[in-house]
Each structure stands twice: as C-alpha cells, then as structure tokens.
Image (cartoon, rainbow, N blue to C red):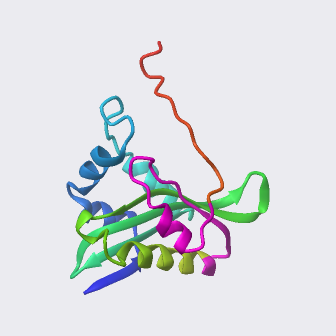
Amino acid sequence: MITYQKDTVENVFRDIGETFIKHHEEVESYAKEVPLDIDRGQYEALELAGVLHTVSVRDAGELVGYYVSIVMPHPHHKGSLFAVNDILYIDPEYRSSEVAAEMIIFAEEDLKEMDVTVMAFSMKVSHPFKSLAEMLGFEETDIVYSKYLGDSR
C-alpha cells in the first residue's frame, strides 16, 4: 500500500540507505567532480528552524520517494513564503505510475496549509519531467545554467 506523509529528516535518513547514492549518481551533473557528502547536521538545523519541509512516499513501509523543500520568505517578497525544492526522487520502479504526481500533489496541499505562496522545483535536463509538471499546473519560469569551477584554482 502506497502512503504519502509529511516526514522528518531523521526518518528519511534512517530509511534512505543506498538510495541517496544511486540518486546522486543518476542525476548529479558533476557526480564525478563533486562527491556526495551529505551534511546531515545542516538538514537537521533547517528542520529545527522550521524551514525544512519533507514529504516521503512509502510502499508497505519501504521508502520509495521523497520531496524536500526549503520554506522561507523570499528576499524580494518578504511577505510571501516560497517553497524551493532541494531534492525530489522517485524509485525507478514507480516512475511510470501515478506516485510522482501524487507525491507532488501531497506536498503542494501541505505547503498550501502552511500559507506558502509559491512552490518551485527544478529538474535535470538529463531527467526531465516537464509534462508531469505542466499537467499539475506548474509553469516553466526559470532556466538555470551551471559551470563546474573546481579545477579553476
């Protein structure tokens, strides 16, 4: 049975196992240059400060997806809460089902209850889900460019 719930960093980190490593290797643009090095303390501090929003998806208790956002007033719009996604993942076995859509809808409903004004997430060019985002009413508003600078010193 698939369940969607607001969760804690502690629960997700406890259950994430090798998934985070696989996720990093699958989608990180600079995976070889920038190794995965999770700052669990920073996530815990964000959660304690009340700005981390975590949703998990489980199938019979097993973690199969997560959606983590930073929720805070935007510096340009101090009266408006923005939820900017930090990480979004669905196990490959569940990607062709409704699980991703339901997870985003669950997160959106919870964020609305928190009086969030704008919900934003990004996607990797190599792993697009534009049709899903548009089906859920999201608009393409920004294009992000990045450049690895690690070897420039």
- Give the residue drawn at x 37%, y 72%: 56
Q: Bounds of the magenta span?
A: 112-139
Q: Along the horizontal axis of the image, is 55 left or right of 61?
A: right
Closer-to-camera residue (115/47): 115
**Residue nearest the viewer, comparing 136 with 45:** 136
Query: Residue 89's image quarter?
Result: bottom left
For image coordinates 26% across by 61% down, the residue present is 16
Q: Please identify the residue farthest to the front as the structure is shown.
A: 131
Query: In the picture provided, is 96 more to the left or to the right than 87?
Result: left
Examine the image and state in which quarter residue 8 appears.
Answer: bottom left
Q: Position of residue 71 (x, y in %)?
A: 60, 62
Residue extending furthest top? 153
Q: Position of residue 11 (x, y in %)?
A: 32, 68
Q: Is residue 56 left or right of residue 111?
A: left
The spot of residue 20 in percent (x, y) is: 28, 53
The vertical placement of 147 against 86, above or below, is above
Number of numbered discs visible in the structure rendering: 0
Whether residue 128 appears in magenta in the rendering, the answer is yes
What percent of the width, then of the height, locates residue 6? 44, 76
Query: Residue drawn 38% across and 80% down?
Result: 4
Frontmost residue, 53 versus 2: 2
Q: Quadrant of the N terminus?
A: bottom left
- In this orientation, does residue 53 appear? no
Tell me which residue sits at (34%, 28%) in the image. Answer: 33
Residue 1 colored in magenta in the image: no
